[in-house]
């Protein structure tokens, strides 16, 4: 009886994880060995703040969940002490935050992941982590759009100023002609 209850609990964990993976924009799988409690606490706080769910789930259950959603290749990296970081909204956040800790903690290592349905190996996740944040990209795009507009405004202002300098002389000429008549 107890084993049936435990089996049902495990099946529910797998089903919940599979559902999260189906709707996720990205996921990163890491080896979390060797990270200090202090760093782990900081990392978890950063992940939570970014809207990323980070959890340690048994490899067998994680493997069943990734197979269920069509990411069976990720099952190959599920060995040792692994954790899963899942983001529903920001595809770059888990990779960016976890890379920071992988760079500073020698035994904490990024294994693999996926973004928008595409499976990434370690190098792919590391490249994803190098992408600037959404806010930075928006600022760069706005800067690219704004720069030509400012240049156009400066040119138009220079033309207006130049016409303004020539306008009094043009107005004076008809006045002189009227006085000569």
Image (tube, rainbow, N blue to C red):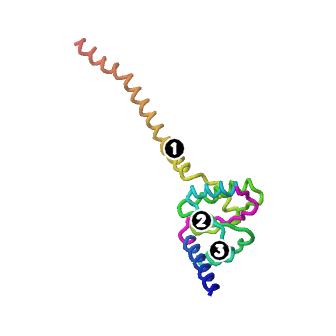
State left or right for residue 145 relative to residue 178. right
Where does residue 104 sit, x and y in percent of width and height? 74, 53
Q: Quadrant of residue 87 in the image? A: bottom right
Q: Residue at x 57, y 55 (%)?
A: 49
Read off the residue under disc 3: 62
**Mark 2 / mark 1, whichever is N-terminal:** 2
Read off the residue under disc 1: 143
Quadrant into which the N terminus falls: bottom right
**Mark 2 / mark 3, whichever is N-terminal:** 3
Where does residue 96 sit, x and y in percent of width and height? 64, 56
Q: Is residue 153 above or below residue 94?
A: above
Where does residue 101 sit, x and y in percent of width and height? 70, 55
Identity of the residue furthest to the top in this view: 180
Is 70 one of the magenta-colored residues?
Answer: no
Q: Residue at x 64, y 85 (%)?
A: 3
Alpha-carbon distance for marks 2 and 1? 32 Å
Q: Quadrant of residue 114 in the image? A: bottom right
Alpha-carbon distance for marks 2 and 3? 12 Å
Q: Quadrant of residue 48 in the image? A: bottom right
Identity of the residue furthest to the bottom in this view: 1
**Mark 1 / mark 3, whichever is N-terminal:** 3
Read off the residue under disc 2: 86
What is the magenta range?
21-37
**Mark 3 nearby-residue class (10 Å; few <14, some 14–19, many ≥20):** many
Helix, strand or loop at mark 3: helix
């Amino acid at each position: 009886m107890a084993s049936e209850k435990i089996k049902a609990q495990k099946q529910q964990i797998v089903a919940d994880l599979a559902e999260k993976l189906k709707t996720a924009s990205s996921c990163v799988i890491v080896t979390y060995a060797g990270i200090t409690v202090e760093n782990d606490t900081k990392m978890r706080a950063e992940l939570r703040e970014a809207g990323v769910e980070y959890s340690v789930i048994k490899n067998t259950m994680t493997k069943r969940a990734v197979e269920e959603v069509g990411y069976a290749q990720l099952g190959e990296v599920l060995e040792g002490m692994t954790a899963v970081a899942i983001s529903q909204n920001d595809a770059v956040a888990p990779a960016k935050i976890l890379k920071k800790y992988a760079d500073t903690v020698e035994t904490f290592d990024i294994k693999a992941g996926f973004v928008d349905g595409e499976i990434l190996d370690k190098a792919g996740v590391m490249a994803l982590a190098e992408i600037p944040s959404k806010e930075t990209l928006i600022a760069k795009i706005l800067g690219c759009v704004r720069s030509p507009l400012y240049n156009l405004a400066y040119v138009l202002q220079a033309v207006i100023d130049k016409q303004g300098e020539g306008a009094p002389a043009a107005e004076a000429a008809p006045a002189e002609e009227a006085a000569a008549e």
